[in-house]
């Protein structure tokens, strides 16, 4: 799995950080920052949840 984020689209809700704190963080303005482009397999469920609950659909997952 590869993770991509569209920072200009992010609305700073922080839902991704709550769902997958090992993969996402927020900058000082609350905009998503990607910590791991290729998360470990045991994190995939959390990352899928983060993408599903993102209110701006700013997270894109690419299955490899």
Image (tube, helix red, strand yellow):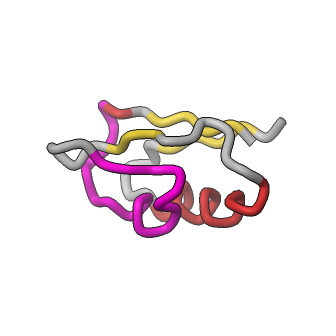
Nearer to the camera, 3 or 38: 38
Nearer to the camera, 30 or 55: 30
| Residue drawn at x 33%, y 37% as measured from the top left | 9
Q: In terms of image quadrants, where is residue 60? A: top right
Is residue 52 part of the magenta span, yes or no?
Answer: no
Taking the image as shown, residue 7 lies to the left or right of residue 38, namely left
Q: Residue furthest right?
A: 64
Quarter of the image where the C terminus is located: top right
Quarter of the image where the N terminus is located: top right
Nearer to the camera, 44 or 10: 44
State the image coordinates of residue 32 (x, y, percent, origin top left): 35, 44
State the image coordinates of residue 25 (x, y, percent, origin top left): 37, 50
| Residue drawn at x 26%, y 48% as measured from the top left | 11
Residue 10, above or below 44: above
| Residue drawn at x 42%, y 33% as measured from the top left | 6
Q: Residue furthest left?
A: 29
Is residue 21 part of the magenta span, yes or no?
Answer: yes
State the image coordinates of residue 20 (x, y, percent, origin top left): 52, 62
Which portion, as a residue range, is magenta?
A: 8-26
| Residue drawn at x 69%, y 65% as measured from the top left | 45
Circle count: 0
State the image coordinates of residue 18 (x, y, percent, origin top left): 41, 68
Taking the image as shown, residue 9 lies to the left or right of residue 42, namely left
Taking the image as shown, residue 41 lies to the left or right of residue 31, namely right
């Amino acid at each position: 799995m590869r993770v991509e984020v569209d920072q200009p689209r992010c609305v700073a809700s922080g839902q991704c950080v709550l769902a997958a704190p090992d993969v996402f963080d927020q900058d000082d303005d609350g905009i998503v920052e990607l910590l791991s482009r290729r998360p470990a397999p045991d994190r995939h469920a959390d990352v899928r949840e983060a993408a599903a609950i993102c209110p701006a659909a700013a997270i894109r997952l690419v299955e490899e």
